[in-house]
Amino acid sequence: MNKLAIVVTTCDAFSDLWVNNITLFDKYWANHPPIYLVSDKPNDLSKKLDVHFIYSNQDYAYRLRDTLKQIDAEYIFLTLDDYLLSDYVDVNRLIFLVNYMEDNKISYMRFFKRTLTKGWADKREHIHLLPLTKKTYEVNLYPSIWKKDDLMKMFVNDESPWKFEVRLTRRARENNLYCTWVNNKKVLPFVDTIRKGKYLRKAYRFLKKNNLFISERKVRTIRETLSLNVRTQLGRHLPKKIKNYLKSKSHKEFYSDYYATDD
């Protein structure tokens, strides 16, 4: 673990998640690497947490970039404030994966139980390949391990997390990065907590069951949950032509439209 540092990106508006996030790291990841909590404003709550607290009034991308410059570790476990560990981390497997990344010159390894990509980097070790085709979000901000030097190549301009994320796959391809994913279920279980500022219903139940802090945030309604599930399934399965047609008829901003730009 001495090759690894944990970076949790956040902002002051989500400070109600910090205690739960760090508490669950301490509970489920024995002797975890140092945690760097990266925010946009000073907050006295950070003094109560055993973390390196770094803040800057820059946008997401440059806050993260400048934080990485202060870290000596070769590899970064990068995550967001609302991805909460939900069970024990398989530390031995995690150590193996970091060493595997180093031995095989892997730049990025995402932890997620489901993806649309196919192919193996190493079938025996259950390490899947990310082909870095024209699909957006193959490389994304779900919990992942990055080789720090390669993550530094992803910064072009200062950007919001949404614009930064949608451009990651293209930039990884342009830099010829070797990118992979593994099923997080038995290695690094986590629960996604927030969507559009509200608690996801499953996450809210998780917080209550584990006697964790619950702020005054609203909980997504059943209707909102069903709507989100339908949109998610349509996004996964609709042909690209139909999705582009539906987008053209909408007046909403889609961050996927920023995929090919660096503005």
Image (cartoon, rainbow, N blue to C red):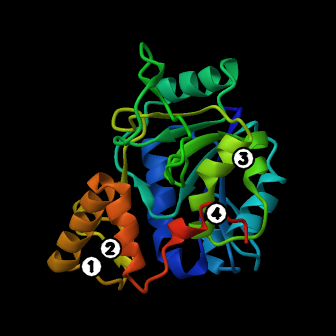
Q: Is residue 254 above or below residue 229?
A: below
Element at label 4: helix
Q: Quadrant of residue 141?
A: bottom right
Position of 124 with respect to 63 (left or right) is left
Q: Are marks 2 and 3 in contact (CB under 8 Å)?
A: no
Residue depth check, mark 2 versus mark 4: number of the one nearer the observer: 4
Residue depth check, mark 2 versus mark 3: number of the one nearer the observer: 3
Residue depth check, mark 1 versus mark 3: number of the one nearer the observer: 3
Position of 127 with respect to 113 (left or right) is right
- Which numbered disc covers residue 63? none
Gap in angstroms between the C-alphas marked 2 and 1: 5 Å
Label 1 crowd (10 A; few <14 / some 14-19 / many >=20):
some
Label 3 crowd (10 A; few <14 / some 14-19 / many >=20):
many
Q: Nearer the viewer, residue 226 or 26?
A: 226
Residue depth check, mark 1 versus mark 4: number of the one nearer the observer: 4
Label 2 crowd (10 A; few <14 / some 14-19 / many >=20):
many
- Which numbered disc covers residue 151? 3
| Amino acid type assigned to the residue bearing label 4 in the image | Phe
On-image quarter of the N terminus: top right
Q: Are marks 2 and 1 in contact (CB under 8 Å)?
A: yes
**Residue under numbered circle 2:** 199
Position of 207 with respect to 170 (left or right) is left
Residue 47 in the image: state x and y as whole percent.
Answer: 66, 70
Q: Nearer the viewer, residue 200 or 205?
A: 200
